[in-house]
Each structure stands twice: as structure tokens, then as C-alpha cells.
Amino acid sequence: MLIHADLGRVEWRDSLPVCERLAAYLNYELLITRRAAGDMLARWQGRWAANLGRYRELECVKLVLPWSTPSMRFCTSELKSAPISSKLRKRFPGLPIVSATGVRREESAARQRMPVSAPMAKLERKKAPGFSWNPIIEWKAADVMAIVKRHNLALHEAYTIYGTSRVSCAYCIMSSEADMLAAATCMDNAGLYREMVALECESTFAFQGNRWLADVAPQLLFPEMRERVAAAKVAAIARQGAEARIPRHMLYSPGWPHVVPNQTDAELLADVRRDVALAVGIDIEYMTAGTIQERFEALIRAKKAHPVTATGSSGHSLLMFDANQSCASDGGAHEPEGAIA
């Protein structure tokens, strides 16, 4: 069977039809998975809301971006790998499972190191093994195109009409600037583009490190949105400048928070939080030295009452303390507080 993880609004319109055409050609069943809690854009929006809430309550020192990053690709782990593995385990409870992918070595340095096959823990069940298999890992792009042509299959419109070098989400954290420019020429992607730029503006975090999605196709933005983009860039600089004043010993490290800040550090953190709140336009708690010291005391008491073990056995503590690394332990991977804006 074929299996496709549908990421919702962030997908190219042609992605699912391509899978359906291939399944029909091969006469294979096509299994489609979707994240029950919402699509990829909803995940980013929800992550920002969660990060903002934890910053407001001083459960982390810095604001954390809403987006996935190359080192924290929860888009892949949560919306692709996890639902696909879950669906396959339920579908084949007692049978060995081999998950074949189209990964190729020439695509990236990380993929150059991947094995042809390996045990896959996410697919394992009691007395039933699971494996990943990359049968075309040694192929070149020309080999792929040749077999597509040989079978007279239609390529994705992102290649044939818009000229992208590869296909993933319409706007991907890993996309080249050229591919994002190409995606912006497809009017099917215009609504998604505006929604993602709106999240850049709200959060003051650019989509790709220091590269703003808003700069890819500003002609698609309404005048009011372009004004918001300009304001968000100014706010981002102010936020970064404020957070740069936080001394290293106050930033996240495993087991945070360790000590109650002294008066000088508490006053500094209060100043930073006020500046960040003003820059980003958010309402927060704990903006005086005294309330910050009281909050740290409460966090330390809670940590001692609910210690996090190596396996994260205490759900409450994992949320507040271990997950402070990301300021957003909502089922995803972690992003250090010092993540680039």
C-alpha cells in the first residue's frame, strides 16, 4: 500500500492528487493520515499561543519562535512519522512492517549517512518487527525522472509549472529562496502565504532564521499587512536587543530554575520583560524584581515537589521545567531559548 501524511493548508494543491494518481496506476491502496489536533499551520499557531502563555507566566526566560527549525523538525516527527507509524501499527498488528521511502543520498549531508535499511522502533509491536527501507537511496535525480518518464507518469505541478527544485510544503523551513519564490507564483498558495506572514507579524519571528517569508512576495500582501511587517521587523530587533542583555547564568540549562535571582538580576530581568512585552505588544505577568523573585521561589518549590526523572515520569514537572528548554512542551521537540529569531 501507499501512505501519505496530509499536512493540510501548507500542502501544494497537487500533492494529494499526485499520490492518488500513482496509487491508481499501481493499483495500490492509498492510506491517508492527518493530525487529529489540526494541520501544520494550526500546529504553528498553537505553538505560538502556548509559548506566549508560558512566557507570560515566567515559565521560560525568553520568547520562543512558533516555527519548526532544521534542528527541531516537529513538522516531520508529529505530522508525518508519528501518524504514519500509528496507522500502520494499527493496520498490521501482528505482521512485520517495512516502510519504504524515496530518500536519496544526494539530497542532503544527513541523508548521505543514512543506511539502506534499519530497524524502526516506531513500527515495532510485541513480537512484530518494523523496518525502514530506502530502496532508491543511491539514485540520482535523473534516475528518478527517467523512471517517471518511462511509465508516462505526470510529475507534480510544482516541478512542471512552477519550476521548483523539490516538493515539500508550499513554504518549508528547509526551502531555498528560489523554491519559495516559485511557490509564491502559484495563486493557490496566496492565502497560506498571507496566514503565515500574519504569524510572523504577530510573533516577530521570521520564518527561516533571519529570512522573512514576508520578503518573498510582498506583492501578495495588502497594504495594512505590509505595514505590519515593517513594524514586526522593528519589534524583532527590539526583542532581540532586550533579550541579549540577559546574562548567561540566567538562561535555560537543565534543571532550570536553579536559584532565585538576586536583586540586581531580578531587576534586570524585569526590565527585559517589560521591553519585550512593549516591543511585541503582549500583556505579561512578573515585571518587577519582587514578583520575579517570588515566582522563581514558587517554581523551585514546585520542581522539588515534582522532580523530573530521566524518563520524564512526572507530567506536571516535564511541562514546567524540562520543557522550559522550548517554552512549549506540547508534545513536540524542544528548541533552546536562544533560538535565532
Image (spheres, rainbow, N blue to C red):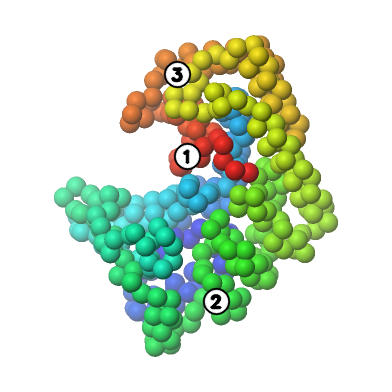
Residue 70: image location, x then y, percent: 50, 51
Q: Which mark is residue 303?
A: 3
First along the sequence among labels 2 and 3: 2
Camera sees residue 188: no
Q: Which mark is residue 334?
A: 1
Q: Residue 52 or 209: which is nearer the viewer?
A: 209
Secondary structure state at the residue bearing disc 3: helix
First along the sequence among labels 1 and 3: 3
Q: Which mark is residue 159?
A: 2
Indicate the quadrant containing the N terminus: top left, top right, bottom left or bottom right. Answer: bottom left
- 11, above or below 263, in the image: below
Residue 286: image location, x then y, percent: 66, 20
Q: For the residues labelled 1 and 3, say whether their Cβ atoms are less than 8 Å apart.
A: no
Secondary structure state at the residue bearing disc 2: helix
Secondary structure state at the residue bearing disc 1: loop
For disc 3, the neighbor class at 10 Å (few under 14, some 14 to 19, many from 20) is many
Q: Residue 87 or 198: which is nearer the viewer?
A: 198
Marks 2 and 3 sit apart, C-alpha to C-alpha, by 52 Å
Report whether 132 appears left or right of 285.
left
Residue 276: image location, x then y, percent: 71, 31
